[in-house]
Image (spheres, rainbow, N blue to C red):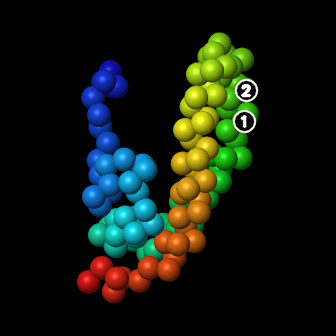
Amino acid sequence: AFDFTVDHRAPIGDAFSSQALTPYEWAHFAHLCHLPFPLVATEMKALAQRILDVIDQVATDVQTAGVPTEVARGIIDVVLPECRRHRDFADQLRRFKARDFS
């Protein structure tokens, strides 16, 4: 079984928390992975938007399954701003060039 008590996250650049992530950190990560910045931007924006599109239905479904409303709302209150931030990062990410990291 997976041990959820252990912190398994890894940094992206120097950012260990989502609040510390910036478009620069994502661009640098893409550069190190040899991924085109437009590809990372497109996928980041699409994933964030997909979550935003279904989050209300997910909240309804988990509440129907018995999750207390305040717990579901608490999760949404964390997820929504993060998705919006990362959706907005996508346009900024496209502006980076490989030479920015040489």
Marking on residue 10: none
Residue with the mark numbered 1? 56
Can the viewer see residue 39?
no
Disc 2 and disc 1 in contact, CB within 8 angstroms: yes
Please state which amino acid type lies under the numbered disc 2: Thr
| Disc 2: CA contacts within 10 A as few (<14), some (14-19) or many (>=20) | few
Please state the total of marks drawn on the protein image: 2
| Disc 1: CA contacts within 10 A as few (<14), some (14-19) or many (>=20) | few
Which residue shows up at 27% across the image and 29% down it?
Answer: 6
Residue with the mark numbered 2? 60
Q: Is residue 1 above or below residue 38?
A: above
- Tell me residue 37's x, y (percent): 46, 74
Which residue shows up at 29% across the image and 34% down it?
Answer: 7
- Tell me residue 42's x, y (percent): 57, 67
- Tell me residue 99's x, y (percent): 33, 86
Q: In the orientation shown, which residue stands out farthest toward the bottom?
A: 99
Can the viewer see residue 23?
yes
**Residue sitting nearer the eye, 64 or 79:** 79
| Left or right, residue 70 beside residue 53 | left
Q: What SS does tag 2 mark? A: helix
Quadrant in which residue 59 is drawn: top right
- Where does the C terminus fall, quadrant-wise? bottom left
Q: CA distance from mark 2 to mark 1?
A: 6 Å
Please state which amino acid type lies under the numbered disc 1: Asp
- Where does the N terminus fall, quadrant-wise? top left
- Tell me residue 50's x, y (percent): 65, 50
Q: What SS does tag 1 mark? A: helix
